[in-house]
Image (tube, helix red, strand yellow):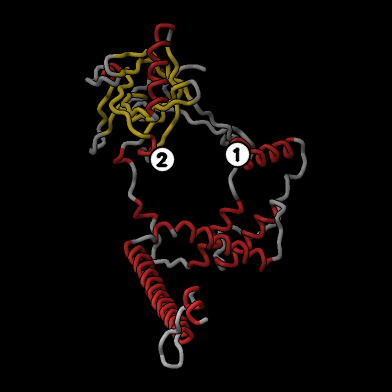
Amino acid sequence: MRSIWNGAISFGLVSIPIKLVNATESRSVSFRQIHTEDGGRIRYRKVCELEDREVSTEEIGKGYEEADGSIIPITEDDLAQLPLPTAKTIDIVAFVPAGRIDPLQMDAAYYLSPNGVPAAKPYALLREALKRSERVAIAKFALRGRERLGMLRVVEDAIAMHGLLWPDEIRPTDAADPPTDVTVREQELDLADALMDTLGEVDIEELHDDYREAVEELIAAKAAGQAPPALPAGEPRGKVIDLMAALEKSVQAAKESRGEAEEGEEAQAEAVGSSSARRAARAEPKQVSGKKSTQTGAAKKTTEKKTAAKSSQSSKSTAKKTASKTASKSTSKTASGKNAAGKPPAKKTASGRKRAS
């Protein structure tokens, strides 16, 4: 690939000579402007308004227009002499987690290639340092006449640089906010969750440009003198319809496209039920609070008290029953061991038997 900029990466006191090449390319079909009556090409000619004549590329330079319309010429030498260290250097200023970069700031992407054999070692050092730290480098560089912000990250075995917009170039979201207050119902959220889950994930490598293919088919048909492909029948886009009905229909269509077609009401109930269960599962850890813990602790204490009370009552009852049985046995033994006079009978011994005889 042809390089569009040569310079160096400044990494502290380390300098890495690099070449900058485009990391992306456009595959869209391009059109030419033509004269509709005869098909002739429409071309633009660069004309000097003072001399009223066409000028060549070599005669064209740059100039800044003042508020009164006067032009201040600016040459390439003027720009080259600017006191900027980034004129030929990608100056790394910080290393930050990748998640800190807002995707809204992302601009064009480039590959940084080591320029020459001596640059291979410091290039690999920076690449491996970025890998191990799991961070990206924020840098400043100058390209096409202005200083820019960039983000360096590792892509496979190469270092890629994304141009970043300056923070003050990002517009606020005020213009995109809904014009009125909108309330979203839980049922609508459940169906939206179900639709997202039904659509599932996708391998981005499998996605392709359907519009470009359709345009290429159109061009091929017209070149062969055939009728252009007909537009498939379908509902008009952008029409405001019932949101719940659209969500239900979308869930069912997504299931059918995946070969999971079910009856409408059953599919909706299952989708909403599974979505509600997932939402409850996500919300359950967040609902754990001091009150819940206190209630749980109080319930445990109450249970323990009831158990202790029952145990105490059971012990008392058992003790009473045991005492009663013991007294009854003792009474029966005493009663059976006394004679009519209330005295215990004489013991029958061997000597007693002899005296009696």
User: Which residue was labeled with disc 2?
Assistant: 103
SS under mark 2: helix
SS under mark 1: loop
Residue 343 percent location from the top left of the image: 41, 87
Residue 134, quarter of the rendered image: top left
Comparing 296 with 300, the one in front is: 300
Contact (Cβ within 8 Å) of mark 1 with mark 2:
no
The residue lying furthest to the bottom in this view is 340
- Image: 106 above or below 269: above
> Disc 2 residue type?
Pro
Residue 324, quarter of the rendered image: bottom left
Comparing 195 with 236, the one in front is: 195
> Disc 1 residue type?
Asp
Residue 199 percent location from the top left of the image: 60, 51
- Badge 2 crowding class, 10 Å Cα cut-off, few under 14, some 14 to 19, many 20 or more, is few
Q: Is residue 223 left or right of residue 171?
A: right
The residue lying furthest to the top in this view is 117
Q: Residue at x 58, y 35 (%)?
A: 28
- Badge 1 crowding class, 10 Å Cα cut-off, few under 14, some 14 to 19, many 20 or more, is few
Residue 263 percent location from the top left of the image: 71, 65
Comparing 329 with 199, the one in front is: 329
Which circle marks residue 203 in the picture?
A: 1
Q: Is residue 323 left or right of residue 269?
A: left
- Image: 110 above or below 288: above
Residue 328 can be seen, yes or no:
no
